[in-house]
Amino acid sequence: MASEKGKISINTENIFPIIKKWLYSDKDIFIRELISNASDAISKHKQLISMGETVDDEVSYKITVIVDKKNKTLSFTDNGIGMTGEEVKKYINQIAFSGAQDFVEKYKEKNDSKDQIIGHFGLGFYSAFMVAEKVTIETKSYQEGSQAVLWESDGETAFTLDDSEYATKGSIITLHIMKEEKEFLDVAKVKEVVKKYCGFMPYEIFVEDANEKKDEKDESKPESINDTKPLWLKRPAECKKEEYIEFYQKNFFDYNEPLFWIHLNIDYPFKLKGILYFPKLKHEFEVNEGQIKLFYNQVYVADNIKEVIPEFLTLLKGTIDCPDLPLNVSRSFLQSDGYVQKISKHITKKVSDKLKQLYKKERENYNKYWDDINPFVKYGCLKDEKFYEKVKEVLIYKTIYDKYVTLEEYLIACEETHKNKVYYVSDLSKQAQYIQMYKEHELDALIMPVMLDSHFITFIESKNTDIKFESIDADITNALSTDEEQVDSNEELIKAIKKSLGDDTLKIETKKLKNKDISAIISASEQGKRMEEMTKMYGGMNMGMPSMNDDTLIINMANPTVEKLITMEDGEKKDLAIKHIYQLAKLLAGKLDSKELSEFIKRSSGILDKTL
């Protein structure tokens, strides 16, 4: 063909600079786009063979990325369908057209290829100009007798198109990298980006260093940088446990084994494949550290896209490949529509189904998993009403006796001692003594130490209006006071305590507790406890809420030390005993500050000296 020069056809004025600079949020995406185009070109050639449009040349398909730091170029080679000069004019110069759309239209009667094509060149090709000052395309069509052509542009709207001596079917795109983008001439950097976006592409990808001296004696075959047959494409029945674990550890850099997983393999009402892993948490409430990678026909799109992955599922790790997702031009963001919502709901359903299956068929394992998965399950219930409805029958709780029970099982077991009341523990360390007292009186409580449990408790109460939750150190006398008639309030003792402590505002009550060994305890209302937990959850901010410091000092009138205290004369010895009893109660409740603790230790040492 004759040498040709011209202007690239653009439907909207001044759109080219926008495409070059702002089409993608991440600059390195140009590597994904060019490799995806190469993959599409190969897919088209395979389809043409299957439809009898061309013959199989029995050449192994591959994509090669060559980094040439010396000449400041980065090239992408494929042995796919290639292009004629006319096709270059259409698909490269008239960027309003999409090669994929034209290809689908041409062969739509012969084969349903829509799901297999992302886009051949089109806008994605122009992402190259984000890092290149000049781009060349050398290409030869699969069609017999076709002339190879060389296309060149410096990133403006001008181009040149000439005949080429390129001898093999396929294309090679060469980017002359800008000075300020030299990071893309680093082989390690390019490999990193290729692995990120194209680590599971269906054709082998090789990254080569043009300046590396090759050992002629080395006859070993170079290794491709990608896994062309990722585990999620297999049928679940074909996968072994070891394969699932290996895939997880390799791709999510977690050397712990996952707790369990869900293998998604859906063909109707949409196509979706993937694996969702439930990781073992390193610490409480690791919700934001999950990673679900979204793929489109094995091309990486993004992590944790909220339109597809419900927020509460982002604790999980895994991969989802859905060729039916409606992606916009950059392939990085989903168009919001009802179809995407259906996919999201279906993923949620699969997760709830898995939890129910484990509960019913593997209850022992389900109990073992619960400590790790309960933050995710509770968060899901709070965020998604339908998820709660699906899993409410399999919500379990760990008791202070290390048993795992449903709420119904707990209430039935405790019906005689506290009907429709649920006692719970929020801090195993600070409430250790209270737990011991409950055990001594054969009472049970649920362990709910997760940060969001204060919200979850309120949520469960709203769903079960006849049930009330109460912390084991809130209004404690309801559970631990004696059955006999309560003693009258000892106002004289209360007055003496306030005087010794120098605090007229301190709330003090006198009760007879079942445990005679304890001289005093600190008790707070359940409302105050929840307000305190909510404040902790929001990083100590009071969120404009009034202070709820309603602690009450409960003096145990059944305690021998208190009985002696009542008969003691006022003086230094009585003051010391009162302060010690008060600080013992605060220590028990985990409310003793550093200054008080130092004072308490000093006083205890003094008492010990006198005893010895």
Image: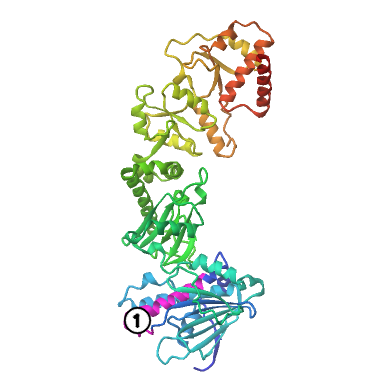
Residue that protrudes farthest toward the bottom in the picture: 2
Q: Position of residue 405 (x, y in %)?
A: 37, 35
In the shown orientation, is residue 382 left or right of residue 362?
right
Whether the magenta-drawn stretch holds residue 395 is answered as: no
* Three-letter code, disc 1: Ile
Q: Nearer the viewer, residue 193 or 563?
A: 563
In the shown orientation, is residue 483 left or right of residue 195?
left
Q: Quadrant of residue 417?
A: top left
Density class for disc 1 (Cα within 10 Å; few <14, some 14-19, many ≥20) is some
Q: Nearer the viewer, residue 245 or 609?
A: 609
Above or below, comparing residue 87 to residue 593 in the picture = below
Q: Position of residue 103 (x, y in %)?
A: 39, 78
Q: Residue at x 52, y 65 (%)?
A: 196
Range of magenta residues: 32-57
Q: Say whether residue 459 is visible.
A: yes
- Residue under label 1: 49
In the shown orientation, is residue 73 left or right of residue 250?
right
Q: Quadrant of residue 244?
A: bottom left
- What kind of secondary structure does the magenta stretch mostly adopt? helix
Quadrant in which the C terminus is drawn = top right
Above or below, comparing residue 423 to residue 200 in the picture = above
Give the color scheme: rainbow, by chain, secondary structure or one colour: rainbow
Q: Residue at x 30, y 77 (%)?
A: 109
Count of all numbered marks drawn on residues in the image: 1
Q: Say whether residue 325 is visible.
A: no
Above or below, comparing residue 121 to residue 270 in the picture = below
Whether the magenta-drawn stretch holds residue 34 is answered as: yes
Q: Position of residue 208 (x, y in %)?
A: 55, 76
SS under mark 1: helix
Q: Position of residue 328 (x, y in %)?
A: 46, 66
